[in-house]
Image (cartoon, helix red, strand yellow):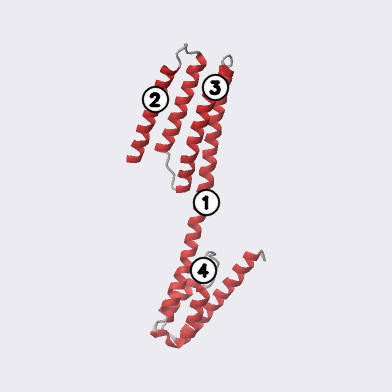
Amino acid sequence: MKNKNSILVIGGITLLITVLIFLLGIENGKRAIDYVSLLFVIIGECITFGMLAFYKHPTMISSLSVSSLMPVYLIINILFSLLFKNLFVHSIPAFCIIHLVLIAIFAILIVVLSGVTNDINKNEETTIQQKAVIDECERIAQVLSVNSRFEKHRTKLLEIYDTIKYSDHVSDYKSAEILTVLNAISNSTDETETDMLCEKALQLIQERNITVTQLKRGGF
């Protein structure tokens, strides 16, 4: 809220300075094109500071993209209004159309950037979730390997832990199944069952590693 208020205050001061410069800077009479230029500069400042103050997006990348894009729009708006207005003294409608096209272009850029950054954010969230599952598998395997209750199976449990530790932690292939088997080992009280579950866990991990490696190489 404090940041938003600061942006609005800066925007208000900028608008005031713009109007004062217009009123005091043109002494030899103001033409229609001058007023139209002022109007679009004010519109540009309102759009820019309004977007900076009120635009909200769940991703930091999107917010930074818009924060960088809006000043660029304002600079182009001001430069076009100041440097090329004299070319449109007798073509004010064309001057207005160009400004509207400029607004439309930046609006489209904002929509595209928001969509792209939103997709990036979703992919990052998916990757984090997938990594969390295999990380949990590694944690459980480590705990089991040092648990005295599974002393007879320590060799296999250490092999399971080492294999998971040095495997790909991004892919979610078979991760949920491996986690289920490791939880079953944790709850197992039968030696034969525990041994079978350890073998199954190793088989799943090895299958996962082979498949993920082939996918990375484009084997599938």
Tell which circle, 2 or 3, labels the residue nearer the N-terminal end: 2
Under tag 4, what secondary structure? helix
Q: For residue 96, which numbered disc appears in the image?
A: 3
Frontmost residue, 23 versus 101? 23
For the residues labelled 3 and 1, the Cα–Cα distance comes to 36 Å
For the residues labelled 4 and 3, the Cα–Cα distance comes to 59 Å
Q: For residue 108, which numbered disc appears in the image?
A: none
Query: Looking at the picture, does residue 81 appear above or below residue 159?
Result: above
For the residues labelled 1 and 4, the Cα–Cα distance comes to 23 Å
Q: Residue at x 43, y 85 (%)?
A: 190
| Residue that mark 4 sits on | 175
Frontmost residue, 160 versus 91? 91
Under tag 3, what secondary structure? helix
Quarter of the figure with the C terminus:
bottom right
Tell which circle, 4 or 2, labels the residue nearer the N-terminal end: 2
Q: Residue at x 35, y 32 (%)?
A: 9
For the residues labelled 2 and 1, the Cα–Cα distance comes to 40 Å
Frontmost residue, 196 versus 170? 170
Q: Position of residue 27 (x, y in %)?
A: 45, 13
Give, as a three-letter code, the residue at label 3: Cys
Q: Position of residue 111 (x, y in %)?
A: 52, 39
Total marks shown come to: 4
Give, as a three-letter code, the residue at label 2: Ile
| Residue that mark 1 sits on | 120
